[in-house]
Amino acid sequence: MAEPMGFFTDTSVCIGCKACEVACKAWNQLPARNGGKVQLSGISYDNTVELNGIQWRHVKFIEDFTPDRSTERWLMMSDVCKHCVQAACLEVCPTGAIIRTEFDTVVIQQNVCNGCRSCIAACPFGVIEINPETNTAMKCTLCYDRLQAGMVPACAQACPTQSIQFGPISELRQRAQQRLEQLHAAGVMQARLYGHDESILGGLNAFYLLLDEPGKYGLPANPQLPSRNLAPSAALSAAGAVALGLLGLVGLRKQRMDRLAAEERGQGEGSHAG
Amino acid sequence: MAITVSRRRFLKVGGAAAGTAAGALLGLGVDLQPKQVRAQQLRIKDAQVYPSVCPYCAVGCGTLVHVVNGQIVNIEGNPKSPVNKGNLCPKGAAIYQLHVNPNRLTKVLYRKPYGTRWEVVDLEWAMDRVAELVKKTRDETFVETLPNGKRVMHTTAIFSLGGATIDNEWNHIQQKLMRGLGIVRIENQARI
Amino acid sequence: MAENHPVAYRYVAEAKRRGSKLISIDPRYTRSSAMADLYVPLRSGTDIAFLGGLIRYMIENEKYFKDYVVNYTNAATIIRDDFQDTEDLEGVFSGLKEAPQGTFQKYVYDNATWQYKRTAAWDAAKAREEAMKAATFAEMIQKMVPPPAEKDPTLQHPRTVFQIVRRHFSRYTPEMVEQICGTPKELFLRVAEMLAENSGPEKTMTFVYAMGWTQHTYGVQNIGAAALLQLLLGNMGRPGGGILALRGHATIQGSTDIPTLHHSIQGYMAHPDARRKHDTLRDYILTETRPTSYWANLPKFMVSYLKSMYGDAAKPENDFGYDWHPKIAGDYSFMASFHAMALGEIKGAFFFGQNPATSIHASLIRRALANLDWMVVKDNFEIETAAFWYKSPEVQSGELKPEQIKTEVFLFPSAQVAEIEGTFTNTARLIQFHEKAADPPGDCRSDAWFTHQLALRLKKLYADSTLPRDEGFKNLTWDYDYAPGTYPTNTRIQGEPDVMKIWREVNGFKTETGELLKGFGELKDDGSTTCASWIYCGAYPEEGRFLPANHTPDPDDKPGTHLGWGFAWPANRRILYNRASADPNGNPWSERKKLIWWDAGQKKWVGYDVPDFPATKAPDTPAKPGATGLDAHDGKSPFIMIADGKGWLFVPVGLQDGPLPTHYEPMESPVPNLLYPKWQNNPIAKVYEHERNQLATIGDPQFPIVLTTYRLTEHHLAGGMSRWLPWLAELQPELFVEISPELAAEKGIKNLDMVRITSKRGTIVAKALVTPRLRPLTVAGKTVHQIGMPWHWGFMGISVGDVVNDLGAWVADPNVQIHEMKALLVNVEKAQ
């Protein structure tokens, strides 16, 4: 097993240039929405609006001004799949299309996915959607193909300010901690890390430095795995038939994963999670 | 006297010769052995790589152009360039679509005087026609001497405008041709 | 910078991580402001008032870098007794006079009184007469050396530059800055303190600007004010200092160096001009050569240039073909030319990769295009200029009809960057080579192919002419075809010129042997060298060595001048005037800020950059009285292109509109000029008069709002390279107008409402983006609203929208004829 790899996105230096969005589309050959013919959203400079099957990086813009401008902040954040250590999508995928790679990233194998949408409902971050061109579920692969070739993911390479940093998770966590301390020392007391430790879904392999509450960025403060929250939330909100089947599938998939994990331990290889 | 230049010879000195992408993909120190799934085919694995420069703003970011079977398949930042170290802005990241784009013109379009539609015309015919028009207008409007006796050897009836994203080599031969003909209304985006 | 040049901003981000401070001064809160330690709003068009306030602050509080100012600037130089400042004449300098016909101006200046006071009498006209009799160019130049200027190194003499500057800016108090700019006094003072804290021997500070400073009727003086301030603070010629122009196109620097511009020929030499004493080559050289600077070499540059034009036909006995070279006789700049086109004076036009149908006062430009007999557009997509005859708003409204437009239109498809080999010069003067990766599709060709093929055809058409007027063109050298057997075989495109042959001509070679020149030091004024562009000389120093293709960056532990990456003109120097990075004795000002220094042991300048100074000229070298060139300067004079080797706080020659920057209002302003009520605007600004080119009056109640325009990082210019790309179109899909919540409330406008924006020249519509990033300012006691619009849109492409430049006016800076799209007056109303 290779070392777990991921993203540390430092929003304090994000300039909202969207190079990550385009670099991602260019490398992964994703189309623009409606061929680029879309309407102004009116939400600051955000016109791609969400993560979905053809939008694997998305820059959020939050204008935070008091009427007298005594506080003036324009927060920007490049959002992406979190590559959760406890990945809800992977848990619920009935076909085994979603895998955890040797880099500890979460990838949907396009030749296996049947477009059942289970993962879409399960993701607590709203990351996954169907790509209308392929009718399969799609999201960030953390440029699995580039990683296998020893290359940096397209978005991280393009990012001009190193807001998006790519590397071994252990190293990224150190860098994040240092940056947090630097900001705190500079008086930016609102700065905090999100997803850098096990407290959120066992850890996010794409974690963040935020300048405010997660809610300010539209991130859930305490996201839950569907195996824990399906009954109260997803089952009620998702389309009935699919959701009813989901509980069972989660169970099956959990069993399979536990067995695999046991086998791996038996071979003397440590768990990659954590 | 004519001295021939061996094509791409200088690049040996510069150390920027094109190679294949696979040679450039080292350095991360990760284990490339697939564990749970087969390795994906990297789509630029066997591509020829050409160093280039972004054509948008004046920062001059280095890019790498990947070509497979004569077709451009990818353009991304050149990590080696001290200008951008592999970074790009959204425009730079989109250069591929400047090249591979269904809206792109590939034929000469021509509109007759008082015409109401475009016609597709032959490139050579169009070049000949433009040359004739330049000569006609120049010859009709050329001024050797102003009424005050000052020599000017020019025409002010032809205007050449453009374009600050076009190579230095074009700028050189364009201004030389224009000035050589006595065309003095030469302007560029750089003015405004 | 973060907004429009994100990748250049990466180095600011790095500097910030290491503790640097960033200030954003802008009429609106941008993506750069979001990154800044301090955001400072100001009214668009009031930068000289702001910078003037900083200049006053540095002088009055003695925050300037005294050693630098005394030694490296003209602060100590004494100006003529008859010079009068704006303080003496209530807003204008001495020398103002009525403009001659055809200049598009009311007034112009005679700069005679702005000159240095000389230590002896000096009759320039008489010297010139004598010089005309000299045998060689060098002797001619020698006779033009004036006596030295009077100086007072104590800076106390009332007519020293330093005291004149002090008096000139005495009224630019923090209170006045607040009144004019609308910037709260406390914020202004915070900026002043931060700049002072971050300048001096240990630290440097830089200004970064783009069109926010240049697109004004006093754009050049905006930059001049920054230069003055940076000289006072000792920030020129030093690492981390300077004034950085963030230019907006891949080789906009290159097309200024190799000028596709009417006013200059190669390497910043003035274009031969029938309005000046340029009748013969000797006249030209006497008028244009600055005898006591590196420009003393101009005869070599000029003769070598003429050799590059006319080859063997350029001989000493025919003034190297100078008479064949055209002379300009007027203002042929962008707006002046469209003005002429609107009056029907232009018959044919070429538009290469530029889209005037969306440019300044675009509706008037589109009407002008209909006056042409023929036009050629060469571009990647069917841009607005190509489609004006059937798709423009004027045709849609029925005002113009295709069947009544005579213009014969050609639209040639273009090859794109990866389909061509060639070079761009970036905003740091760095020439970089790009390889050809693939053939372009169909009939797409490089622009160089087009020009080369057109030239070959014209050469044939004129081959049999015996007219004297065609002699020059017949003698014009045109040798760019590949040598037999060397044309690339891996392409289906035929007829491309050989890029390396073009570079032979640009770089230059010895005419006898064909040997490439290693640098401009080898140039001669006798015809034995040919060189199109003296500043690019040395980029191709020998066969097989083409420095723009160099790809060896510095390793991480090196200072990062990257001398092995590309080629920066001149002579691969990365920081101009870098002699100023060392103190007068040649030692670094500080360890932190060292760049080059004098090595007494080796008796030469050494360091991390190529010295922009004679390599072995010791700091204690005295100036040679009466000498020409750099011998006229001592070893402590870093500014080698300037007549006295000093940085000019006060500019006696070269600027049309005064030796010092002065605050004037934009041509359209909501308020009177508080500093000089008698002179509202730059007195010599240009106005290209036309019935459709009307201006709003001062504080015009019909147009009470200030509009400023700008670019977004998601698009490029008028969109010709971005609105056609789906990936970019979706990022900023529609034209919008940024409006403060305060103005929106006043006008009953909600976010995403369609609104109408009207200037004295036109009306457009756009969607409202109501944002607190815009804010009303209090200016001269009244509330002034500012709105902002990106100007990327037009009527062709994937993403379409109204042309913001339709609102613009044909008014111009008198030095460079740039327009004033950064500060207009408009009104805004809800459209429904």
Image (cartoon, rainbow, N blue to C red):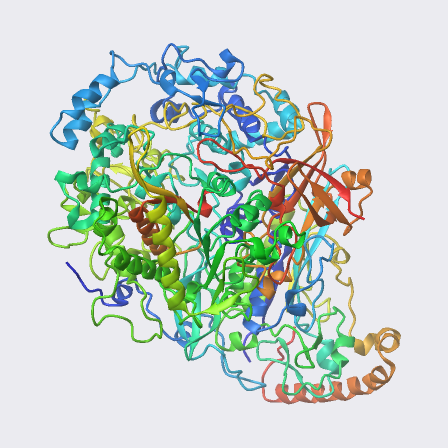
Nearest to the observer: residue C124 or residue A230: C124
Does C590 appear above or below A27?
above
Position of residue C550 relative to residue B181, above or below, is: below
- Along the viewing direction, whichever of C527 and C503 lies nearer the viewer: C527
* Res B166 visible: yes
Q: Nearer the viewer, residue A188 or A77?
A: A77
Residue B40, relative to residue C423: is it above or below? below
Query: On the rendered structure, is C551 left or right of C199?
Result: left
Image coordinates of residue A175 in percent, x first then y, are 57, 58
Residue located 82% across and 84% down the image: A242
Relative vertical location of residue C688 with respect to residue C253 in this rendering, above or below: above
Q: Is residue C423 visible?
A: no
Q: Nearer the viewer, residue C663 or A72?
A: C663
- On the image, the x and y values in percent for residue C537 come to 25, 48
Image position, residue C74 (x, y; %)? 36, 22
> Residue A5 occupies which quadrant of the picture?
bottom right
Give the image quarter of residue C594: top left
